[in-house]
Image (cartoon, grey):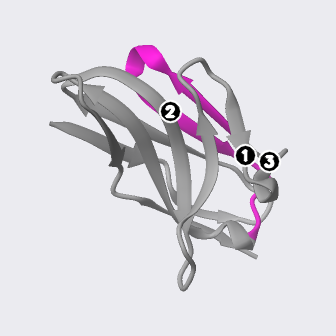
């Protein structure tokens, strides 16, 4: 059984910063790509950033230069450092990980989501 648990969301003023964390636990043999998605009310879930197991990151254009994704493989944790936040960044943020478990099967797991609200 594998779980992803997110933390770090909250309310922040425009221009502020937040750091999201997502820790994976359970019967994990290997974690491949990890990522952060977000979903605002009335919108589809969209990819924000992804990072490979070797640490190569990629971002959606709207967050480039403001958000930084990183991971600590020893802790099975992925982070999203968000700076210069804008009201349009308001959404529920979900982490996502491609995990190979103890049976060598690979499955994509999702966290429960954490709310980020940016006030103007």
- Residue 81 coordinates in the image, percent (x, y): 65, 41
The answer to which image quadrant residue 24 occupies is: top left
Q: Is residue 45 left or right of residue 29?
A: right
Residue linked to disc 3: 66
Q: Residue furthest bottom?
A: 42
At mark 3, the secondary structure is loop
> Which residue reaches farthest front?
105
Numbered range of the magenta stretch: 68-86
Of callouts 2 and 3, the N-terminal one: 2
Q: Position of residue 54 (x, y in %)?
A: 59, 17
Tag in front: 2 or 3: 2
CA neighbours of label 2 inside 10 A, class few (<14), some (14 to 19), many (20+): some
Residue that protrudes farthest toward the right in the picture: 65
Say which mark, if any, is on residue 46: none
* N-term-proximal mark, 1 vs 3: 1
Instruction: Look at 73% across and 53% down and name the residue there.
Output: 60
Inspect the magenta stretch and tell me whether residue 87 lies in it: no
Pointer 2 residue: 33
95 over 27 or under it: above or below:
below
Q: Mark 2 to mark 3: distance in Å?
A: 21 Å
Q: Circle 1 sits on which residue?
A: 59
Instruction: State the image coordinates of residue 58 (x, y, percent, origin top left).
Output: 71, 39
Residue at 50%, 55% (x, y): give it: 9
In the picture, the quarter occupied by the C terminus is bottom right
Q: Residues within 10 Å of mark 1 (few under 14, many from 20)?
A: some
């Amino acid at each position: 059984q594998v779980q992803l648990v997110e933390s770090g969301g909250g309310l922040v003023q425009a221009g502020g910063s937040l750091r999201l964390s997502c820790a994976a636990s359970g019967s994990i043999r290997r974690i491949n790509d990890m990522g952060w998605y977000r979903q605002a009310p009335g919108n589809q879930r969209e990819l924000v950033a992804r990072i490979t197991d070797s640490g190569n990151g990629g971002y959606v254009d709207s967050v480039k230069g403001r958000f930084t994704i990183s991971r600590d493989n020893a802790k099975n944790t992925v982070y999203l450092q968000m700076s210069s936040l804008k009201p349009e960044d308001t959404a529920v943020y979900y982490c996502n990980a491609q995990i190979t478990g103890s049976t060598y099967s690979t499955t994509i797991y999702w966290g429960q989501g954490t709310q980020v609200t940016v006030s103007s």
